[in-house]
Amino acid sequence: MKFAGVRRSVVEPLRRRRIRVPELAIGIFVIAAAIVVSIVLNSDDDKGTGVLALGRDLTRGELIEESDLSVVTLTADSDVALLSTDLSAQVIGMRAAVDIDAGTPLSSSHLIDIEPLSSRDAVIGVVVDDSKAPVDLAPGDLVRIVFLDTSLESGDVVSSLPNVAEVWSVSAPDEVMSERSISLRVARELSEAFVGHDEIHLVKVVG
């Protein structure tokens, strides 16, 4: 038969070269398997991993809302510890620790967790200008509260709260007076200490 003739024409030269046909078949199979595995792995790398990113610019201290989150796909070569998409529920409601540009993949260093208000807390509002508080204050910052009072008998009297306060919110500056309304989270028993002072100054605690 013609088929038998073709088979002998292929096999006989291999035998003359002392190549064993079964071993050759195994070698070809191993090479083919390696190619298939390489293709699969490269396909997975191209697919990548979905991580959380921001859909808009955020400034330091802003709360992260559900509408702020988006998803970007990174390849497996990325070795930065980024937040996976299954953490989105935990990220919502946290604060931005720094200014973050839209499209930036999120890591834990970008975020500040917020301890919920409790019955032991009070939120106090004060109005200050740039001479009484740092211009870069943002929610989440810690500040010391300094009171300045003037009396005819004693002159200027300076006092302060024993504990630091947390900046809870900051309004945009008033265009005319350059004043801002700042809400402070303090221990409830200290809330009355804010009443009756001539001036209230906020000193940012660094470190």
Image (cartoon, rainbow, N blue to C red):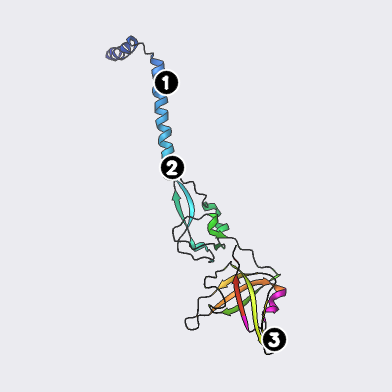
Rounded to the nearest angstrom, the CA distance separating label 3 from label 2 is: 74 Å
Disc 1 versus disc 3: nearer the observer: 3
Q: Nearer the viewer, mark 3 or mark 2?
A: 3
| Residue type marked 3 | Ser
Residue 135 position within the rendered picture, expressed as x and y whole percent measured from the top left: 52, 73
CA–CA distance in space, label 1 to label 2: 29 Å
Q: Which residue is mark 1?
A: 26
**Residues at badges 1 and 3 in contact (C-beta under 8 Å)?**
no
N-term mark: 1 or 3: 1
Q: Position of residue 7 (x, y in %)?
A: 31, 14
Q: Say which residue appears at 41% left-offset and 40% top-offset.
A: 43
Residue 190 in the magenta stretch? The answer is yes
Tell me the SS state at disc 1. helix
Q: Considering depth in this image, is 162 or 139 the residue closer to the camera?
A: 162
Residue at screen point 42% across, 20% down: 26
In this picture, residue 155 sits left or right of residue 89? right
Q: Give the amino acid at mark 1.
A: Ile
Above-or-below relation of 116 to 45: below
The answer to whether 116 is drawn above or below residue 82 in the figure is below
Say what amino acid the circle numbered 2 marks: Asp
Whether tag 1 and tag 2 are in contact, CB under 8 A, the answer is no
Instruction: Return the residue at label 3.
Output: 154
Secondary structure under tag 2 reads helix
Residue 48: x %, y % from top left: 45, 46
Task: Indicate the position of residue 60 as horizontal and vertical percent values.
Answer: 52, 65
Asked if the residues shown at circle 3 and circle 2 are in contact, with their CB atoms under 8 angstroms apart, the answer is no
Q: Which residues are magenta?
A: 189-199
Q: Which residue is mark 2?
A: 45
Picture quadrant of residue 160 = bottom right
In space, the residues marked 1 and 3 are separated at their CA atoms by 100 Å
Crowd around label 3: few <14 · some 14–19 · many ≥20 (10 Å): few
